[in-house]
Image (cartoon, coloured by chain):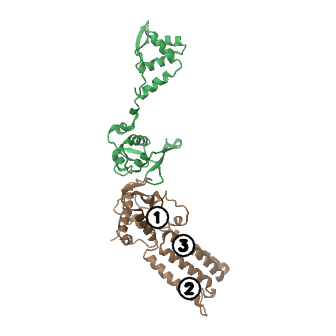
């Protein structure tokens, strides 16, 4: 299950009517949103949202039925167990920047980003960037890990030849185990237009 | 052969401010209070300046500052002791022997100082450094960034670094500071040294510097102010790289016992002795 689906499931499981709703789904062969809402004393919209979410998560099946002129949906439980299983490794940045390719990066010209050098002067300890534009812009200070600080210290200048993350990490003598946290800061700085990806 | 300079001409008068200030006060005192008081006031100001000149000497060990301080001290003594009638007029009597000695000393030290000045021995070499760093670089777009740039890694000892730093300071090639992690080298343009010489703390973050850390890493940074001293927008990455490599070259020359070649290289540029 991906994180978004897990978050959706978690949201609905946390509702105080969730257990009662599932009890209905278990005990009824199929049920409509209006039947569930009246049985649980909920607003029909609340019942519809719950059933639609469970349908998206493929825990229930929805079927369009016709009664006189007006079609509506009936919902049937299709799974007897709910498993909330999230692979946290999938959140790793390792495969995300550049879609897993060896993308080339360098500092963006006039990024406006401010770097603070660590006391020994061989890496950055934090950076300050502007979040937003114009008068609404807010100053955002980000503390860097030592690996991130060393990486950004070795980032090519705006007029220098762009290099891959791997090459910069080699230059900065950062071991491969730090790749995920490096990619995390690179992604943030690409989004903030402080790093140019070529 | 005419060489087009990369830096804008020096129009700063900061270096002449003490001279202009003392001369103005002296002339004003002369007009208001007469020769005797003016000589005493002038002497006191010059004595103060002599003492202040000892501070850069203590920080750099450059002989020029010591000679300059002694010269100012002797000149102040001369101003205290010379008979007022002997100034700006023909003096009918004979000058006392100690005043005669002070006149000779003052003239001798002045000649020595002029000699040092002409030979660029009492000139901060920041302008030469920046010209050498920009050699061979062509105009580009403005690509300034305030980040320092790693240059390369070298092998050296802490003692070698300390000696190199002392050499750079003593010859006014650059100001240097050794802290507990690195040797920091600051190229100074002439008359820009005053804040660094007379401040207790050493504000270098907004200045240009090259650092040699104790792990062998060499890093260069050029400040926006110094970058804008160039007439044209130069490729910033290459400029920082060139500045760092220039000091690496200096370091290697110094280690090989060819420190004089560094000075020759800068003298060859024939930059004005007062800029």
Display colour for chain B: brown
Mark number for residue B54? 3
The vertical placement of A53 against A100, above or below, is: above
Find numbered disc 3 in the image and state the secondary structure of the residue it sits on.
helix
Q: Is residue A144 left or right of A176 when viewed as pictured?
A: right
Judge whether B73 appears above or below B133 on screen: below
Q: Looking at the image, how many numbered discs can be counted on the residues?
A: 3
Q: Residue at point 58% right, 76% down?
A: B46
The residue positioned farthest toward the right in the image shown: B33
Quarter occupied by the N terminus of chain B = bottom left
Q: Give coordinates of residue A38: x percent, y percent.
A: 53, 11
Please, what secondary structure does the residue beneath circle 2 have? Answer: helix
Q: Picture coordinates of residue B175 (x, y %)?
A: 47, 65
Can you identify the residue that label 1 sits on? B176
Mark nearer the N terminus (3 vs 2): 3
Q: Colour of chain A?
A: green
The location of residue A40, given as percent across then percent down, is 53, 13
Q: CA distance from mark 2 to mark 1?
A: 36 Å
Q: Chain of mark 1?
A: B
Residue at the (48%, 75%) spot, across then down: B64
Is A151 displayed left or right of A13 in the figure?
left
- Circle 3/circle 2 CB separation < 8 Å: no
Report the chain holding disc 2. Answer: B
Task: Report helix, strand or loop for mark 1.
Answer: strand
Chain of the residue displaying label 3: B
N-terminal of the pair, mark 3 or mark 1, is 3
Residue to which mark 2 is pinned: B102
User: Are callouts 3 and 1 both on one chain?
Assistant: yes
Seen from the viewer's position, the closer of residues B219 and A187 is B219
Residue B79, compared with residue B229, is above or below; it is below
Q: CA distance from mark 3 to mark 2?
A: 20 Å
């Amino acid at each position: 299950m991906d994180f978004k689906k897990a978050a959706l499931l978690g949201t609905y499981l946390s509702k105080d009517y969730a257990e009662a709703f599932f009890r209905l789904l278990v005990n009824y062969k199929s049920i409509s949103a209006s039947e569930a809402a009246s049985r649980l004393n909920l607003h029909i919209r609340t019942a519809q949202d719950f059933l639609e979410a469970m349908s998206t998560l493929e825990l229930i099946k929805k079927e369009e039925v016709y009664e006189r002129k007006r079609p509506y949906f009936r919902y049937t439980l299709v799974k007897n167990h709910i498993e909330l299983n999230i692979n946290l490794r999938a959140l790793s940045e390792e495969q995300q920047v550049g879609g897993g390719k060896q993308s080339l990066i360098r500092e963006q010209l006039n990024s406006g980003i401010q770097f603070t050098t660590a006391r020994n002067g061989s890496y950055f300890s934090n950076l300050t960037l502007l979040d937003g534009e114009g008068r609404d812009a807010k100053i955002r200070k980000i503390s860097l890990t030592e690996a991130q600080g060393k990486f950004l210290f070795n980032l090519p200048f705006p007029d220098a030849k762009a290099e891959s993350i791997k090459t910069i990490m080699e230059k900065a003598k950062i071991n491969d185990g730090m790749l995920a946290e490096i990619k995390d800061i690179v992604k943030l700085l690409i989004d903030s237009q402080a790093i140019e990806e070529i | 052969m005419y060489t087009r300079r990369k830096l804008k001409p020096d129009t700063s008068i900061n270096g002449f401010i003490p001279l202009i200030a003392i001369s103005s006060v002296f002339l004003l005192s002369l007009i208001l209070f007469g020769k005797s008081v003016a000589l005493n006031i002038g002497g006191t100001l010059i004595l103060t300046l002599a003492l202040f000149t000892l501070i850069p000497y203590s920080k750099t060990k450059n002989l020029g500052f010591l000679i300059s301080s002694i010269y100012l001290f002797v000149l102040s003594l001369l101003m205290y002791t010379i008979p007022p009638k002997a100034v700006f007029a023909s003096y009918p009597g004979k000058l006392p022997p100690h005043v005669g000695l002070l006149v000779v000393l003052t003239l001798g030290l002045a000649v020595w100082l002029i000699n040092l000045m002409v030979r660029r021995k009492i000139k901060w070499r920041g302008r030469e450094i920046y010209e050498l760093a920009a050699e061979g670089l062509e105009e580009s777009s403005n690509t300034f960034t305030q980040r320092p740039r790693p240059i390369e890694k070298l092998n050296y000892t802490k003692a070698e670094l300390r000696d190199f730093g002392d050499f750079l300071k003593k010859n006014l090639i650059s100001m240097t500071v050794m802290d507990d992690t690195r040797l920091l080298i600051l190229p100074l343009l002439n008359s820009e040294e005053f804040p660094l010489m007379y401040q207790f703390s050493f504000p270098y973050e907004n200045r240009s510097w090259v650092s040699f850390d104790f792990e062998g890493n060499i890093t260069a940074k050029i400040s926006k102010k110094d970058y804008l001293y160039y007439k044209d927008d130069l490729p910033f990455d290459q400029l920082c790289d060139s500045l760092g490599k220039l000091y690496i070259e200096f370091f290697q020359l110094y280690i090989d016992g060819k420190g004089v070649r560094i000075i020759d290289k800068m003298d060859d540029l024939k930059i004005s002795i007062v800029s």
